[in-house]
Amino acid sequence: MAVALLILLVAAFVSTLVGVSSLGYQRVLQEIWAQLTGGVSPLSEREAAILWYLRVPRVVLAGLVGAALAISGAAFQGVFRNPLADPYLLGAAAGAGLGATIVVVSAPGVAGWGISPLPLAAFVGALGGVGLSWVLSQSAGRGNSATLLLAGVAVASFLTAIQTFVQQVNIDTIQRVYEWMLGGLNTTGWQEVLLTLPYIGVTSVVLCLCARLLDVLAVGDEEAASLGIRPARVRLLVLGAASLATAAAVSVSGLIGFVGIVVPHVVRLIAGASYRVVLPLSLIGGATFLIAADEVARTILAPAELPIGVVTAFTGAPFFLLVLRMNRSRS
């Protein structure tokens, strides 16, 4: 845990230094010290604005989104007892995509709102997709994870079909929707951080508190019930918290894949399979991974910016090949 936190701090500090405008690590350290002690800032007004209103909020937002996706992925994998379970499994991605598409198509009608309604629409859409999956699974008369998983697949397909139809009817908006779906962390201050922090903070605490329960669920529902645990309630609590965290992350970042699968896998390979370890380390590892990915996205084609979802996909695909090769060698 201490090593993971140290790596996170190093990644966050390096990310604040990287950009079109070079600030220098010594001057950044002096600026941080000046802010803590009330001393004189070594940066100009423009440089201080770049640091505190562009780079630092973006690094914090990347950490929050990465942490939310990674811990949600680990929680989903614990509930479904499947290491390939994804935070977007129950229709969160499809719902968020539909909500974002509707806002983009309706942009002329909401231009006067003063704030962008897109994050709110994506948030509501993601929660709506998960909620619809839950209602559909309950209407089938079974509360088990397999029924919920099938309901999530059906809902995701249905919402994706609606989104595709809306895009085809409004073909001029496809590029903007596509850019959002590739993921990005464009910030103009602390607004996005303040919007997502309460949701991600509370749900992360809830999921970490459920770690022991997930360890018990791993041995089976019957064994868990014999120990006095109600698997259905635990599953509902964990899925609800993980879905809320995912919705909050998606609302400000778009769809960023592989974080919720790659990070928990790496944690298990290094620290073991107990969720008392996997969940908190996934939280820290997810933040570190996405901060590093965002740093690559900002610099590899500078001054242009690569969608962060492309960077995570380039990382995730080779990782799966490596996992498959390791499993083959073991067998």
Image (spheres, grey):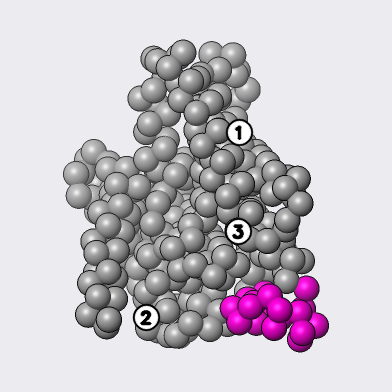
Q: Nearer the viewer, mark 1 or mark 3?
A: 3
Find disc 2 in the rendering and name its residue: 269
Q: Residues within 10 Å of mark 2 (few under 14, many from 20)?
A: few
Pick whichever of labels 3 and 2 is earlier in the sequence. 3
Residues drawn in magenta: 209-230
Residue 305 is labelled as: none
Q: Give the structural element (helix, strand or loop) at label 3.
A: helix
Q: Nearer the viewer, mark 3 or mark 2?
A: 3
Find disc 3 in the rendering and name its residue: 146
Using the image as rendered, state which of residue 137 and residue 209 is in the foreground. Answer: 137
> Which percent across, then down, holds residue 183?
40, 43
Using the image as rendered, state which of residue 285 and residue 79 is in the foreground. Answer: 79
Disc 2/disc 1 C-alpha distance (Å):
37 Å
Residue type beneath disc 3: Ala
Is the C-beta separation of discs 2 and 1 under 8 Å? no
Image-based side of 53 in relation to 143, left or right: left
Residue type beneath disc 1: Ala
